[in-house]
Structure formats: structure tokens, C-alpha cells
Image (cartoon, rainbow, N blue to C red):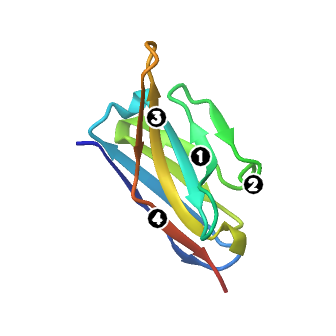
Amino acid sequence: QVQLVESGGGLVQPGGSLRLSCAASGIIFCAYTGGWYRQALGKQRELVAAIASGGSIKYADSAKGRFPISRDNAKNTVYLQINSLKPEDTAVYYCKATLRTSLGFQYTYWGQGTQVTVSS
């Protein structure tokens, strides 16, 4: 059974920081791209950042310079450090693991999400 379990969300004041973690089980995580997405109330889910198995990284423009992503394959975990938080960063943050095989198959798994609320 595949599980992605996020943690680290919470209530933080503007300008604060949080470190989100996503622990994977049931998959060979080192082969997967690990990504973080977020969904604010009334909006579509959007990519925040993703890190491929080889270490290449993609950021949304809103995340560049503020939300570094990293992974620890020995711990089957992907991290998102969220800094200089703004009220508009308030959202549910979701972890996603994706594997695309050489034969064209794609495997995608999502976590349950962790709430980040930025408010004074």
C-alpha cells in the first residue's frame, strides 16, 4: 500500500517559516519525482516545486527564492522549506510522487494534504 504522509503545516505569522515534510512508503521513492502543490480556497491546485529523482528542480514563479525543495532518499522523504510567508500563501499543501517509465506508463500518488495558514 502506497502512502504519502505530509507534516509540518500550521498557523504562522506573516514573514514566518515552516518546513513541510512528506514521507513516502510502499514505493521505491528514489525513482520518483517528488513534488509539492497547493490549493487555496476557491482556486485550482497549482505546482509549487518539484524535484526529480536525479535532483533537477522546477519551481513555480511564486516559489522561486522562497521555497527551497529538497529530498532525502534514504528517508524516503521530500521537504519544502517555506520562508517569508505571506497571507496569500495560505493553502492546503499536497505532496505528489510521480514515476514515468520508459514504456510510457505513469504512476502518480498524492498525500492527504497539510494546511498552512498565514495570519497575524
Asked if marks 1 and 4 touch (Cβ < 8 Å), the reply is no
Q: SS of the residue at dot 2?
A: loop
Local crowd at mark 1 within 10 Å, few (<14), some, or many (≥20)?
A: many
In contact (CB < 8 Å): disc 1 and disc 2: no
The residue labelled by disc 1 is: 69
Give the amino acid type for the residue marked by disc 1 in the picture: Ile
**Mark 1 vs 2, N-terminal side:** 2
Between disc 1 and disc 4, the foreground one is: 4
Separation of disc 2 and disc 3 at Cα?
Answer: 22 Å
Instruction: Provide residue 15's location: percent of width, then percent of height.
Output: 71, 73
Which amino acid does the dot numbered 2 rest on? Ser
Mark 4: which secondary structure?
Answer: strand
Q: CA distance from mark 1 to mark 2?
A: 13 Å
> Foreground mark, 1 or 3?
3
Mark 2 neighbour class, 10 Å CA radius: few under 14, some 14 to 19, many 20 or more: few
Which amino acid, mark 4? Thr
Q: Which residue is mark 4?
A: 114
Residue at 51% over, 50% down: 79
Q: Which residue is mark 3?
A: 98
Query: Which residue corresponds to mark 2?
Result: 62
Residue 36's place in the image compared with 56, above or below, is below
- Three-letter residue code for mark 3: Thr
Mark 1 or mark 2, which is nearer to you? 2
- Closer to the N terminus: mark 1 or mark 3? 1
First in sequence, mark 1 or 4: give its number.
Answer: 1
